[in-house]
Image (spheres, rainbow, N blue to C red):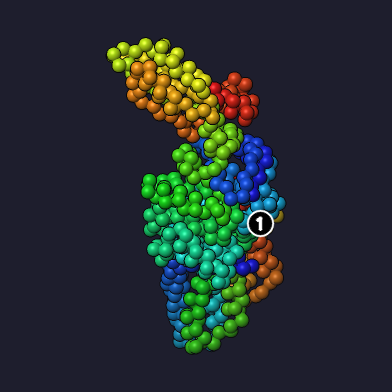
Amino acid sequence: MRNVWIICRKELRSYFVSPIAYLLLAMFAIVFGFFFWNGVNAFVFVGMESQMRGEAFPMNINEFLIRPLVSNVSVIGLFLIPMMTMRLFAEEKRSGTIELLATSPIRDSEIILGKWMAAVILYAGMLLVTAINFLWLFRYGNPDWKPLAIGYLGLLLQAGALLAIGTFISTLTRNQIIAGAATFGACLLLWVLVWVSEYEFSPWARVLSYVSVLTHFETFSKGLLYTKDVIFYITVTFLGLFLTARSLESLRWRS
Amino acid sequence: MITVSQLTKRYARNTAVDHISFEVSKGQIVGFLGPNGAGKTTTMRMLTCFMPPTSGTATVAGFDVLEKPLEVRRHIGYLPEAPPLYPEMRTTEYLTFVGKIKGLRGPELAKRVEYVLERCAIRDVSNKVLGKLSKGYRQRVGLAQAIIHNPDVLILDEPTAGLDPKQINETRDLIKGLAGDHTIILSTHILPEVEQTCQQVIIINKGKLVATDSVDNLQNRARGVGSVLLEVAGRAGTLDAATVQRRLEQVTGVSRVVLKRARDDRSTFEVESQRDHAVRGDLARAVVESGWDLNEMRSAAISLEEVFLQLTSSEAADEQASQGAPAELEAVAGKAQE
C-alpha cells in the first residue's frame, strides 16, 4: 500500500509539474462556469416568466439546475479523461522509465493502482473546483444537498471506471496521442451505445445499452442511489485495472 | 552470486538467447561482450526480472528469478541502455523517488541519496532538472540510481555508450571503484573497455555463448604462445632471409619462426616461443652477433578484438559446416588457437 502511495504521489507531481493539471483544471473551470452561469440565468428567466403569468413557482432548483449540470459535468469529463490517462504508461514506455519501475521491488499491481489513483485524485480535484459555484448556490438558494452528493458520487464512480479503461489503453502504445485518441473513442462509444435502445429491443440491444455508461449515470444524476449501478461502475473499474495488469504482464513477455 | 543455467528467450520468429549458462562469483566485474543484437540486453533483462525466460533459470544473490522476482529486484541495481530518467524531475528528487520504490525509508534514504550524490560526482547538478542534463551527467545519475539501495549485484547495459572519451574514462573509473562492494555485469561491444575494467568475459553471439573465461586467459588462449615480431636488416645492403630464419630457429625456447615479409635488405619475422621462455634477449644477441642489424622488436599482442573476431567468426564457420549445430565451446576455443 505504501508503494501505491509513492507511485501515486510521483504521478500527481508530474501532473502538476507539467502544465497538464493546470490546463485541465482551467478548462474545466471555464466550461463548468459557463454551464452554471447559463443554468442559473435560465432558471431565473423561467422563474420570472411564470411569475409574470401569475403562475405559482413550481420549479425545483435540484430538478431544473443541478440535475442537468451534473449530467453536463460527466460529459465534460468524457473529454478530459483521455488527457488524464494518456501519458500514464505510454510516456513511461517511450522514455524507458518503465524499465526502472518494472525492475524495482514493487508489484505491477502497485504501479497500476498508484497511477490510476493519481488520475482519480486529479479528477476529484477538478470536481472540487465546482464547489466555488455551488457555494453561491447554497448561499442564495435552497437546494437539497443529498441529490447533489449522490450525483457527485456517481461522477466519481463513472470517472473511476473510464480512467481504468484509459489506463489500460495507455499500456498498449508508447505514443500519448494514440493512447488519448483511442481512450476518447472508447469513452464516447461507451457513452452512446445506449442509443440503440431507442429503436431496437432485442437482447443484444439490451446488452449494449446496459454496457453504456450513460444508462447507469441517469439514476445518479436524479439523485437516486441504486446498488446495481454502483456495482456496474465498480465492475468496469476492476475490469479496466485487470486488463491493465494483463497488458503489463504481456509487455514483459514480449518486449 | 549469479548463476545462469540454460537460460533461453524465444520470440515468435527468432531465439534471442539460446541456452546460455554461466556463473559469476561475488565481487567480480564481468564483461558481457557481443555484437549488437547478440542477446546481451535480453539476457540482462531476464536477470533483472524485467522479462521472464522462456525456459531455463537464473538465480541472483540466491533467489530464483522466476520464483522470487521481488527479492531478486531488491538485490539488483540496473542501468538500462538509456538511463531511465524522468525528464521533469530534479536530480535529488528523482534519487529520492527511486530510493523509495527500492524500499529505502526515512533517515537511511536521505543518507543513501547523499552517498550516491557524492560517489557519482553529481552533487553539482543535484538541483537541476534531469531533462536538461548533459549525456555524461545523465549516465552518472543513471548509475547513482542503480546503486542507491546498495544492491549486491549491478547490471549495467552499455554504461559508456555515447559518452566522450573523458566521460568514458570517468565512468570506467567509477565502475571499477564500485567493484569491491558489488558484483558487476556490464555489457559492451567495445573491447578495450573489457580489457581495462573486467576480470572475466562472457562472449555471446547470435544468442549463443561463445566463450567465458578470464580476460588474461582469453588473450593467452587466442595467442597460444607469446610471439615477437622482429625486423632484421643486413649491413651490406643485402640479406638472405633463409639464413636469418635458420639462425633464429637455433635460439633456445623458440618454437617457430615465420617469415612475414622479405625485402632486399631487410626482413620481418614472427617468432613464437614457449610461454615460460624469455627469448627476446637471446634473439637480439643472435641477430647482432651474426652481423645483422636489429631494426625493430615488438610483441605481437593480440587484442580482445581479435579474440572476439576469431571466436565469433569461427563459430559462424563451424555453424555453416555443421548446418547450424551448436558449436561446442572447447572446439571453438581450439579453433581460436590455430
Nearest to the observer: residue A37 or residue B320: B320
Q: Residue at x 47, y 60 (%)?
A: B119
Q: Residue at x 60, y 55 (%)?
A: B152
- Provide the chain ID for the residue under circle 1: B
In the image, residue B175 sits, relative to residue B124, either above or below, namely above
In the image, residue B142 sits, relative to residue A18, either above or below, namely above
Q: Residue A96 location, x and y as percent?
A: 50, 52
Side of A158 relative to B86 (left or right): right
Q: Residue at x 46, y 58 (%)?
A: B120
Q: Amino acid at mark 1?
A: Glu
Nearest to the observer: residue A151 or residue A236: A236
Q: Secondary structure at mark 1?
A: helix
Q: Mark 1 = which residue?
A: B71
Nearest to the observer: residue B63 or residue A39: B63
Residue A243, located in which quarter of the rendered image?
bottom right
Side of B68 relative to A120 (left or right): right
Q: Residue at x 52, y 52 (%)?
A: B79
In the image, residue A153 sits, relative to residue A190, either above or below, namely below
* Within-10-Å neighbours for mark 1: few <14, some 14–19, many 20+: some
In the image, residue B257 sits, relative to residue A136, either above or below, namely above
Residue A130 visible from this viewpoint? yes
Residue A83 visible from this viewpoint? no
